Amino acid sequence: YAASPVLASHDHLHTYFEKLTTPHYDPRFVPIEEKRGITMGMAMTEKQGGSDVRANETRATLNAGSTHEYTLVGHKWFCSAPMSDAFLTLAQTSNGQSCFFVPRWRPDGTRNTISIQRLKDKLGNKSNASSEIEYNQTYGELVGEEGKGIRTIIEMVHHTRLDCML
């Protein structure tokens, strides 16, 4: 549920918030609109920047005629919970690092272009999958203000750490 506070604070993502906070798990690989409940992961880290996400090179370009739909291109070194229905991720816009909601399926019902490159071999926490992923003309919706993405996604990071402690 760590993404729920982020989704709750943005009107255009409220439908996802309701499905994220339901007690019903829906394992089907179908668009969010067809599911009772969803899970979410996050993808922030890139190889060249490590924990300094300000150095991320993944790019996001505003789609023509839209105010919040973007196309993302880039590589993420760590994607937490790659089996999820959607992710919060960071990408560079002309105004700096911005946060995006990236679903597995595009609004038109086709699969979004999120390619898992490999699963990570982690020491310790093996039950929580991590992977490298590639965005190639991937659909994403802006979350928060352009250029304020780190501030936006940190709320999910904060709640993830709290969930892990609990």
Image: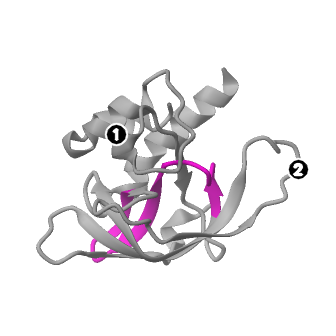
- Could you say which is closer to the camera, residue 72 or residue 55? 72
- Tag shown at residue 16: 1
Q: Amino acid at mark 1?
A: Tyr
**Disc 1, SS:** helix
Q: Amino acid at mark 2?
A: Leu
Residue at x 28% of width, y 37% of height: 15
The correct choice, above or below, for 129 with respect to 93 in the image is above
Q: Would residue 31 be found to the left or right of residue 114 on screen?
A: left
- Looking at the picture, how far across and down is residue 28, in whole percent? 54, 44
Does the magenta run of residues contain 84? yes
The correct choice, above or below, for 92 with respect to 6 in the image is below
- Looking at the picture, how far across and down is residue 45, in whole percent? 60, 63
Residues shaded magenta:
78-101
- Looking at the picture, how far across and down is residue 34, in whole percent? 37, 42
Q: Main secondary structure of the magenta part?
A: strand
Residue at x 64% of width, y 77% of height: 48
Does the magenta run of residues contain 107? no
Q: What distance separates the C-alpha of mark 2 from that of mark 1? A: 32 Å
Q: Would residue 20 be found to the left or right of residue 53 on screen?
A: left
Residue 52, picture quadrant: bottom right
Graded by Cα atoms within 10 Å as few (under 14), some (14 to 19) or many (20 or more), the crowding at tag 2 reads few
Look at mark 2 in the image and give the residue it sits on.
123
Residue at x 30% of width, y 33% of height: 8
- Could you say which is closer to the camera, residue 152 or residue 102? 102
